[in-house]
Amino acid sequence: MEIIEQENRWREKYAAWKAKSGGRVVADIDGDYPLIENSRAPFTPARRALPMMNLALISSAGAYIDGTDPFDTEAPEGDYTFREIPSEIESEDLRFSARGYDPTLVQQDVNVQIPLARLSEFAANRVIGQLNYAFWSFCGFIPDAGRLVDSMLPKLIERLQRYEVRAALLIPASRLCHQSVALAARAIELAGIPTMMLSVEREITENTRPPRAGFYKGKIGSVAGQPNWPEHQRRVLDEALRWIEAMDQPGTLKLVVELESQVEAARGER
């Protein structure tokens, strides 16, 4: 199965869009940008229970360690590098190269895009076996999806395999990040590693067709839950992660976290 179906046709559309844009740096995708449309999704069944899995976190929020090189947010076709960051890093040591999303919320609470505290809690409570020793970050606003697939994703998969990752949680940040992250999920699944993608942009997600996605009506730049509300973050993550093991075919699921939060607000609890 292909990561990008009818890739040559998509590349032609992308070349036309690129010529029309004149190679300028764009801050968001417009109505002429050729979003990828896949008809099928790869699928790797979970071979272990969630409490026995080494879970990897992959974020497209452009996180990097303070004092190291940031991502290039001025590259017209995107930055095709990624950062491997220790999972035990202190949140104040993270910086963000934000493109396509407002970094205000992640600067308030890193867990809305890099939920290390919540996943560490899950590991301590045996919801997951363990959080992998490193997580991976890239700047997911990448218009040239073909180059993303050819250049970056094989290197990322090699690192996941080196760490013997058994499942991966992928969290986009911007609208276009949803496409980049969905393509990453497809590539990782084709390599035999089950994935789960969080989503707050259903149309782009369903067009790109990641193997598994958990959708709710959240916010761009705060995809893993609302800032400074740990319980909301736990709800989003817990429900999505538990579907890795339960799903027996590809698809996008609507998370009930939205309904739970509405009930809580109606009671005056939030």
Image: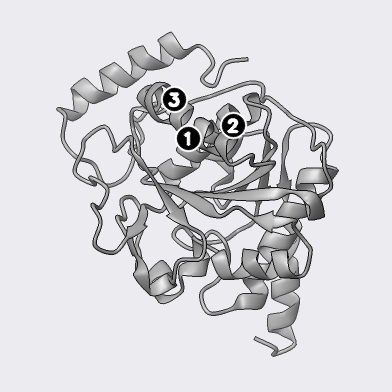
Residue drawn at (58%, 70%) of the image: 117
Left or right placement of residue 125 versus residue 103 in this view: right
The residue indicated by pointer 3 is 149
Residue 52: give x, y in percent of width and height. Answer: 79, 51
The amino acid beneath tag 1 is Leu
**Residue 162, placed above or below residue 259:** above
Residue drawn at (72%, 69%) of the image: 124
Residue 125's disc number: none
> Quadrant of the image for the N terminus?
top right
> Which residue is more in the foreground, 10 or 163?
163
The residue indicated by pointer 1 is 156
Distance between the alpha carbons at the discs numbered 2 and 1: 9 Å
Left or right placement of residue 23 versus residue 263 in this view: left
Which structural element holds mark 3?
A: helix
The amino acid beneath tag 2 is Ile
**In this orientation, does residue 265 appear?**
yes
Left or right placement of residue 198 versus residue 178 in this view: right
Residue drawn at (31%, 55%) of the image: 98
Its colouring scheme is one colour
* CB within 8 Å, label 2 to label 1: yes
Which structural element holds mark 1?
A: helix
Residue 164: give x, y in percent of width and height. Answer: 64, 39
Decide which of tag 3 and tag 1 comes sooner along the chain: 3
